[in-house]
């Protein structure tokens, strides 16, 4: 990698204009240095960059017309397949017979952990691009907060896995049989290079994009905390969609909502840039060029600076919302709330749970996001236990912590295989594979954390303690990540069964019963997902043209997996106003809603904005969007 090469990695809250800002940044850098070649990469391969640039992109860099800028969409699936092939070849050389375990049985233990490490494969690809010196700089339109946190831990996870295989922590007093020679040094060296690269500001610049909202603030705080844990320093924090000062009293009131978050961002990061909200999102290369010309970060940040007196306005009474008696919903247990970031998904999920509790009885509200927000919305401190929400008679809430469940699973595995840890074990001869069996969870696929969510949701389902289970999912397609975990987790469990079933009588009987129990839980959850009487999905988004592709992708995912969609809620549509700017936005949003109704081909409801973000039971009861929407006939209703 030559001096001066730099990778700019944009990450942060979903729906925060990451794609727009990363694209504009890349275009501006390429215009400033016309003799340099720049590459713009979409990390998640969702098609959002193609939609913005109005050109079909693939995994191969494509030169944009008349520019020294290239663009590509990272195909992490293909990269992972190529990388897995090389990896399996190395492991095949490494694996040998270990006591009673054959070479094939050893491979069933050690291969699953890296078969789906797409994030590491993507980082390998970016590293190779910079090493090839094809480009002078790379700008990445990165993932949302939860996926970014997983990405930060991906390389350390792989390095720890290699350390386990290489027996780097073994002591001289260990009685474990000697391991075979290891052809894994090249992977270890590459992991160490990647880790050092990601922590070097001169070559890897992390740029966090956020919104000035309470929930986005909580997620950004968690992301910055994980960066600090991994030794990463953000180069910049960009706060998008900040309201201007001089666009009328209604807009100024919404600006007051943003003030507390912006002040906190300034205390968390040394470099904070404010980006003004644009009425129309740019489309195409020419539209992006116009945006770049109008966006001068330093000048715009100074113009948008908040005065000391600016703060949140009082809550606005829900406009045009009739007090209706909602008819009973179909007898479904799970209500999954998902969709693009910034749409008020968590607020809708909480409000629905509050209303259903009043109407039907005990309801369990769960958050599966890596960065939870239920505590902020309910103004109750929640943990990874079912706790009753203060002020309610039947609403219980829980913010899932996958690590707690994993620790419990690790304990159960050890109990079932306690003879493996005994110094004078009289159990089966395991040879050098004994250390591997002691660390089975470290040899599991990355989706094990998602399997923790599946297992906890299935427990809630089979207990029949709650009439409804409302689930707040992460942003956009990461909302369905845990659903995609079903296949790799089933393969892992089958691999464990295949490795040890031949040795059931030699001490593995209890362990195999635990594996069979986990498989049954997986089967039960998968059956519930495709059954409309047990599961329904509700997508929440803003009435903005840029949101349409994300909702279309989510709907396509649900249809492809035959998961039932209840409806789409277009949230935070402005009510009628005497403010010309606000009324113009309202009209524009209703036009987008009509367009969405045609394109999405799904039951759709338009719900109003309240003027501020509702928190606490009192404000949530005023915010009747979610259950009002669920009670409507399948056609759009504007508030």
Image: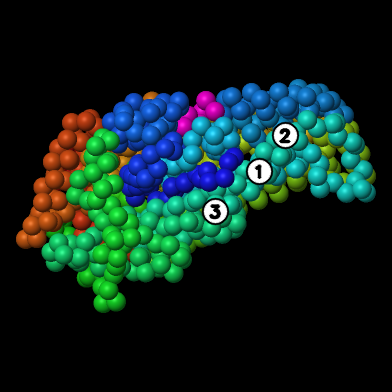
Q: Quadrant of residue 553?
A: top left
The spot of residue 417 in percent (x, y) is 78, 41
The spot of residue 392 in percent (x, y) is 36, 64
Q: Is residue 585 above or below residue 635?
A: below
Q: Give the range drawn in magenta.
A: 74-79
Tell me the CA gap for discs 2 and 1.
Answer: 11 Å
Q: Which residue is drawn at 57% across and 25% down?
A: 81
Dot 2 corresponds to which residue? 186
Reading the chain from its start, which is encountered first: label 3 or label 2? Answer: 2
Around disc 1, counting alpha carbons within 10 Å, would you say few (fewer than 14), some (14 to 19), or many (20 or more)?
Answer: few
Circle count: 3
> Which of the pair 583/412 is nearer the observer?
583
* Side of 25 where 78 appears, left or right: right
Residue 193's mark? 1
* Side of 415 where 216 appears, left or right: left
Tell me the CA gap for discs 3 and 2.
Answer: 25 Å
Dominant SS type (magenta): helix
Whether residue 307 appears in this view of the structure is yes
The spot of residue 8 in percent (x, y) is 47, 46
Around disc 3, counting alpha carbons within 10 Å, would you say few (fewer than 14), some (14 to 19), or many (20 or more)?
Answer: some
Q: Do the residues labelled 2 and 1 touch (CB within 8 Å)?
A: no
Dot 3 corresponds to which residue? 201
Q: Is residue 76 magenta?
A: yes
The spot of residue 402 in percent (x, y) is 56, 49
Residue extending farthest to the left is 578
């Amino acid at each position: 990698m030559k001096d001066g090469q730099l990778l700019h990695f944009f990450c942060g809250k979903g729906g925060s204009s990451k794609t727009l800002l990363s694209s504009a940044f890349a275009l501006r850098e390429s215009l400033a240095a016309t003799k340099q070649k720049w590459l713009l990469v979409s990390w998640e391969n969702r098609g959002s960059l193609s939609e913005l640039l109005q050109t079909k992109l693939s995994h191969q860099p494509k030169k944009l017309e008349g520019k020294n800028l290239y663009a590509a969409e990272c195909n992490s699936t293909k990269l992972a397949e190529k990388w897995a092939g090389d990896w399996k070849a190395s492991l095949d050389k490494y694996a040998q017979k270990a006591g009673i375990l054959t070479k094939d049985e050893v491979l069933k233990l050690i291969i699953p952990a890296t078969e789906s490490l797409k994030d590491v494969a993507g980082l390998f690809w970016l590293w190779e691009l910079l090493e090839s010196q094809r480009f002078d700089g790379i700008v990445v339109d990165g993932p949302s907060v939860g996926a970014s946190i997983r990405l930060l831990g991906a390389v350390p996870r792989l390095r720890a896995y290699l350390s386990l295989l290489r027996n780097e922590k073994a002591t001289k007093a260990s009685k474990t049989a000697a391991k075979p020679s290891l052809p894994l040094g090249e992977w270890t060296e590459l992991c160490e290079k990647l880790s050092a690269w990601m922590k070097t500001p001169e070559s890897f610049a992390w740029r966090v994009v956020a919104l000035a909202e309470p929930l986005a603030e909580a997620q950004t705080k968690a992301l910055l905390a994980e960066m600090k844990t991994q030794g990463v320093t953000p180069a910049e924090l960009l706060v998008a969609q900040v309201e201007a000062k001089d666009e009328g009293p209604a807009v100024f009131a919404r600006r007051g909502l943003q003030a507390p978050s912006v002040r906190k961002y300034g205390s968390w990061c040394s470099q904070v840039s404010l980006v003004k909200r644009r009425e129309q999102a740019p489309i195409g290369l020419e539209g992006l060029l116009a945006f770049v010309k109008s966006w001068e970060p330093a000048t715009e940040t100074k113009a948008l600076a908040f005065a000391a007196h600016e703060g949140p306005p009082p809550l606005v009474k829900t406009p045009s919302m009739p007090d209706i008696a909602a008819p009973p919903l179909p007898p479904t247990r799970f209500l999954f709330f998902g969709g693009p970031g910034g749409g008020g998904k968590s607020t809708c999920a909480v409000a629905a749970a509050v209303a259903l509790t009043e109407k039907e009885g005990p309801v369990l509200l769960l958050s599966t996001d890596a960065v939870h927000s239920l505590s902020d919305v309910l103004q109750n401190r929640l943990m990874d236990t079912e706790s009753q929400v203060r002020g309610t008679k039947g609403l219980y809430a829980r913010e899932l912590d996958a690590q707690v469940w994993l620790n419990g699973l690790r304990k159960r595995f050890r109990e079932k295989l306690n003879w493996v840890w005994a110094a004078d074990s009289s159990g089966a001869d395991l040879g050098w594979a004994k250390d591997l069996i002691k660390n089975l969870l470290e040899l599991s696929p990355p989706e094990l954390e998602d399997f923790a969510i599946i297992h906890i949701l299935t427990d809630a389902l089979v207990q029949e303690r709650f009439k409804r289970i409302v689930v707040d999912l992460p942003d956009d397609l990461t909302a369905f990540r845990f659903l995609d975990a079903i296949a790799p987790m089933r393969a892992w469990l089958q691999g464990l069964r295949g490795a040890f079933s031949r040795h059931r009588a030699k001490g593995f009987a209890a362990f195999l019963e635990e594996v069979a129990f986990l498989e049954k839980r997986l089967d039960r959850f998968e059956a519930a997902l495709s059954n409309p009487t047990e599961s329904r999905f509700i997508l929440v988004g803003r009435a903005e043209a840029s949101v349409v592709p994300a909702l279309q992708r989510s709907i396509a995912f649900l249809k492809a997996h035959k998961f039932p969609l209840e409806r789409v809620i277009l949230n935070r549509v402005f009510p009628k106003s005497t403010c010309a700017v606000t009324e113009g936005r309202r009209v524009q949003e209703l036009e987008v809603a009509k367009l969405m109704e045609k394109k999405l081909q799904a039951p759709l409801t338009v719900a109003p904005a309240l003027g501020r973000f509702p928190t606490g039971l009192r404000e949530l009861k005023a915010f009747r969007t979610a259950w009002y929407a669920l009670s409507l006939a399948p056609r759009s209703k504007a508030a």
